[in-house]
Amino acid sequence: MVHVNPPYRCDVVGSFLRPKTVAQARVKFSCGQISKEELTAIEDAEIKKLIAKERENGLSAVTDGEFRRAYWHLDFLASLGGIRHVKAEAWSVHFEGHQPKAETIVIADRIRFPENHPFLEAFDRLKALAGDAPIKFTIPSPSMLHLICCVREENYEAIDLYKGNDDKLFADIAQTWKDAMLALYAKGCRYLQFDDTSWGEFCSQEKRSAYAARGIDVDTVGRKYVACINEILEAKPEDMTVTMHICRGNFRSTWFSSGGYEPVAENLFGNCRVDGFFLEYDTERAGGFEPLRFIKDQTVVLGLITSKFPELEDKEAIKARIQEASKYVPLERLCLSPQCGFSSTEEGNIMTEEQQWAKVRLVRDIAREVWADAS
């Protein structure tokens, strides 16, 4: 069974629980008690330990655990040219339980990728720490910029440059992500992931109805998102893998969307030219595997192991679900991972670090038993 990596048979979405040393250092830095250089040194030390743990627990590609970020998405988006980071009265979506601290972004000028974007330095530092280990690096999907600023925001008013000109807006978003992708590639990135919660929302009948009541056709928006992503991928070098992770919310073990993939499957799976999809499948909220019939030649990483709770899944039950999914996507194009990261924000999900690694080892062990070429 030949498998071209990545994605890997045993893979992860990207984020890991923040060590107390990192959490404490970030608080001290925000209060002016330590310098940026001191914070970075602490992050580097903990990321080096994380890389060792990732390799020890069976992961082929290593990540920085997103230790330098407060959020999986806002740190990247807020550092783009033309974007302003602002406080908000409430989070842009409602989680079923704990609520993140309310912050958001607005489009204030022409959108662009700056040469000094902090994620470029973050990649450099990860590369220096990773040695010869393959690296996986995550950034939010371009869809997220539009979703947060223009769809979720009920009082969105376009700046003059984009007023009445969606084509210009999406062209600038596409160019921004092209520039980001190629800048990371030039630094050695060969495995990049776009993280995206827009499709989770567009799967939800409740959210689809709410958007329709505001005059927003999410199917039309979704087609624009796929076209934008495909335009970015036209510039992707042949030896670079770009995947997409689709999520229904992950903050302190909570969620914000429910619904199977059927409403978006034909457009997304059938037309989006990413190399692979990381798909949430750890609860009934994600529905069945039937929508995978629209998958073409992409790899599908089944998120069958939950990152939200510490209880370990039954191995045989997970193997049975993998076999069920193989009715729609051949087994040689399937992989396994947790459904999301363990710490989409710096607060992290409700489990211990050892429970987190037990989940990773479970993915590793099942992958080795299902696929002879698992790595």
Image: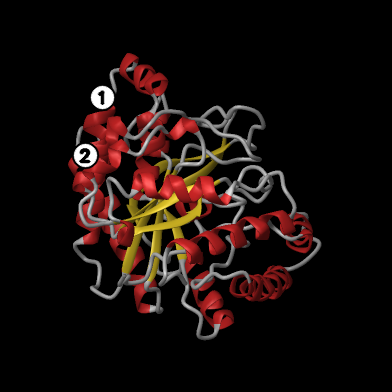
Front residue (pair 78, 210): 210
The numbered dot on residue 92 is: none
144 in relation to 27, above or below: above
Amino acid on which disc 2 is placed: Asn
Secondary element at tag 1: loop
Expressed as whole percent of the image width and height from the top left, the position of residue 268 reads 26, 43
**Would residue 116 be found to the left or right of residue 324 on screen?**
right
Asked if 202 appears above or below 197 in the picture, the reply is: above
Question: What kind of residue is marked 1?
Answer: Asp
Lower position in the chain sequence, tag 2 or tag 1:
1
Tell me where residue 143 sits by quadrant: top left
Colour setting: secondary structure
**Dot 2: what SS?**
helix
Residue tagged 1: 217
Quadrant into which the N terminus falls: bottom left
CA neighbours of label 2 inside 10 A, class few (<14), some (14 to 19), many (20+): some
Residue 171 percent across, percent down from the top left? 22, 50
Depth check: give the residue in front, 302 or 215.
302
- Residue under the point 64% across and 32% down: 99
Residue, far top: 213
Q: Residue at x 35, y 22 (%)?
A: 208
Left or right relative to 33: residue 223:
left
Sort mark 1 into few (<14), some (14-19) or many (20+) by Cα contacts within 10 Å. Answer: some
Above or below residue 304? Residue 28 is below
Q: Is residue 230 above or below residue 125?
A: above
Q: Which residue is mark 2?
A: 267
Of 250 and 282, the residue lying toward us:
282
Q: Residue at x 81, y 62 (%)?
A: 33
Label 2, label 1: how far apart the Cα atoms are: 14 Å
Q: Residue at x 19, y 37 (%)?
A: 165
Residue 18: image quadrant is: bottom right
